[in-house]
Image: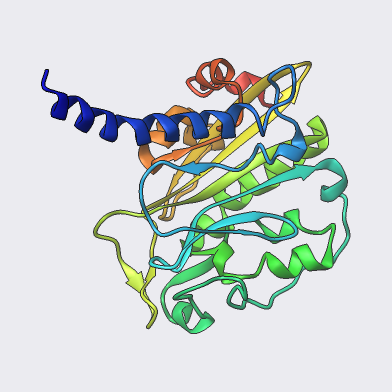
Amino acid sequence: MKSANKKYIILVLLPIAILAIVLYGYKNKQYTTADGNPTASNNIELPTLLTPQSEQVIAHEGYTVSYNSQWCIPNWVAYELTADEVAGNVPRGDDFVPDPLAKGNTATTNDYKHSGYDRGHMAPAGDMKWSKTAMDESFYLSNICPQNKNLNKGDWKELEELAREWAKEYGNIYIACGPIVAVNHKTIGENNVAVPESFFKVFLRKTENRWTTTGFLFENKAGNKKLNTYIRSIDEIEELTGIDFFPLLPDNVEETIESQTNIYDWNM
């Protein structure tokens, strides 16, 4: 091989190798404990986008949002929900407003008027009763998507209520949810707010030193079915969304539990 070619290959491969080392350290050193198990303080619920798209990650008191200013809706919303938080008694808010921390284009309430869609929460207000600030921030439009009215008030709401029962039963759970937006998607309002084709919601918990997950996928349309008909593996939802869920889990654990759809690990 000619010397010039060797130098070219080195120049191309060296940055890739450096990036791989940095990313490996990011996952396996900074965010895991000595025994390889992530802790709650590591923000284990936070996903990672695997496909290039608009993203601004904003940490609010009750949830973290990956905001997409091109769609004016979130890529994902993630948070931990505990039994103590479910027991909160802060009254429900009702003031939908743009997220003051969101950069770029943002939805307004006028975009949703006469659109035929509800302002559907990703992190629900019912999970934020433990804090007035968390409750108010759950009404930021960065946490909201155009959602079919029947879905919002029906099966999606039923899963939100089940999640609160899980948090009480298991002590705490980790949740990530959001929209799936088609390439040729519909929009509403002057700000061209993207209308999702469907919605996902994934859960993680640890009991008796064992991690377990489950996922759900809902089309953005009317219908009423048993919740277990919406169950999908995390791997399936990752394939549809281009999102890596619970990336801070040890690789061997993540690969095992995310391929499963065992509903018997969750009380439904």
182 relative to 6, above or below:
below
15 relative to 196, above or below:
above
121 relative to 108, above or below:
above
Count all numbered tags in the image, as a single digit.
0
Colour scheme: rainbow
Q: Nearer the viewer, residue 173 or 15?
A: 15
* Rendering coords of residue 202 (x, y %): 56, 38
Q: Nearer the viewer, residue 15 or 46?
A: 15
Q: Is residue 135 left or right of residue 9?
A: right
Question: Residue at (56%, 20%) from the top-left corner?
Answer: 257
Q: Is residue 244 left or right of residue 174?
A: left
Question: Residue at (76%, 65%) from the top-left corner?
Answer: 135
Question: Residue at (58%, 63%) from the top-left corner?
Answer: 143
Q: Nearer the viewer, residue 156 or 154?
A: 156
Q: Is residue 27 visible?
A: yes
Position of the N terminus, as image quadrant, is: top left
* Rendering coords of residue 22 (x, y %): 51, 34
Residue furthest toward the left? 2
